[in-house]
Image (cartoon, rainbow, N blue to C red):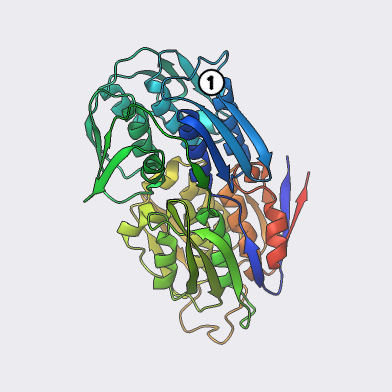
Amino acid sequence: MPHYIVEPVSGVSGTVRVPGDKSVSHRSLMLGSIADGVTEVSGFLESEDCLSTMKAMRALGVRIEQIGPQAVRVHGVGLRGLKPASHALDMGNSGTAMRLMTGLLSGQSFDSELIGDSSLMKRPMERAAKPLREMGARIETLEGKPPVKIKGGAALKGIRYELPVASAQVKSAVLLAGLYANTPTTVIEPAITRDHTERMLLSFGCQVDAAHGEVALTPPTSLKACTLEVPGDFSSSAFFMVAGSINPRQDAVLTISGVGVNPTRTGLLDILALMGADLRVVNHRSAGAEPVADIEVRPAQLKGIHVPEHLVPLAIDEFPVLFVAAACAQGETIVTGAEELRVKESDRIAVMAEGLKALGVTCEVLPDGIRIQGRPEGRNQQDPGAKVFSGGTVDSHGDHRIAMSFSVASLRAAAPIKILDVANVATSFPDFPGTAGAAGLHVTVHE
């Protein structure tokens, strides 16, 4: 089983570009497949997760060409042109793909089955299945978990569904099923979540109205193929935002170029700003329906905060690396309202707490979050590069974001960090060690 050895380094600097946005890449394949015409996608993330979605759409009868680096061409078969797969569709490690595909397949005329790797087979699927059943879908899970079996031929009806917990994946599953419903579908959010699905549906010619926490979709007669540009993944850039913020080199600037800055994704920018980080979003531009910019990061003396709960859904994937920043901050950081972290690729609250404690950081797991004791206030103020982590061994439990987060911790470690079970980093960030190395981190892979 591969593991990382991450050596302490003197600092990070320069310019890096992160891979394409995973959420946008998944959706580009799904919607391009059911559109009329050919959809061209640039900046596509060629990670294991997105390639799982590509294989699934091909198994459903869609011709998808990889025409160059990060470039794909999707030959759409139309809204009702998908064909039954000859086998169960393996979504790999991707909960996003499985939940969205459950919605997409609920309106098909044929039966489908969704499976995944050992991690995905343990993840909850009922919160997506429940509203889909209200729409008329016939879905079975195994005690709430995969495999997900979908019976074809269901007549779907539009519903007005109030999400019990803010979740872009559940919202998207309902909207994708809504494409096949007989009346409009409305999803009501308790808090704003990422809106990539709504933006992309608009690009494909669908009528989507979003206002005041409600998203309404009118079922289309067809989707029209378009050209899509996938921006750099904000969640992948988060590791470098934190690395630049806790950088021991006080004169250095680390720039992440071409990052998607969709406002439903950028809660981490607001949280880090509250902690005193020096982050500058510059060179604003557009990648189709998604806003893009460069992010310049300078070292800063971070301070602990109680993270505002309204920002939690807007930074849900970035919390593992934020916990690293919190350990380096002065004072205590408290996160609450983050139950969602317990049902990601791992229980990210428990696994991060385990790793932080292994590296000498004091923290306490809360029912819906964590309390992290950073550096004592008033101590080492003249040494912003002071060592925070002892070095040692942490287990990522197969969670890609855990593995990459502890790689960033090496900037403030007194000794090397060994990170176990890192194969799944490839699900979201191919060649993370190479990109990290370009910034100045020293990550080596060992079998």
Residues 64 and 147: in front is: 64
Where 37 sits versus 438, above or below?
Answer: above
Helix, strand or loop at label 1? It is loop
Q: Which residue is mark 1?
A: 60
Residues 37 and 239: in front is: 37
Residues 362 and 383: in front is: 383
Q: Position of residue 254 (x, y in %)?
A: 61, 71
Residues 402 and 387: in front is: 402
Residue 388 in sight = no
- The quarter of the image holding the N terminus is top right
Q: Residue at x 39, y 53 (%)?
A: 369
Is 141 on the left or on the right of 85, as rendered? left
Q: Position of residue 244 (x, y in %)?
A: 58, 71
Amino acid identity at mark 1: Leu
Is 155 on the left or on the right of 1, as rendered? left
Residue 58: quarter of image: top right
Residue 198 in sight = yes
Q: Position of residue 279 (x, y in %)?
A: 49, 73
Q: Position of residue 153 (x, y in %)?
A: 36, 12
Residue 392: quarter of image: bottom right
Is 115 on the left or on the right of 435, as rendered? left
Q: Residue at x 44, y 40 (%)?
A: 343
Mark 1 is surrounded, within 10 Å at the Cα level, by few (under 14), some (14 to 19) or many (20 or more) other residues, namely many
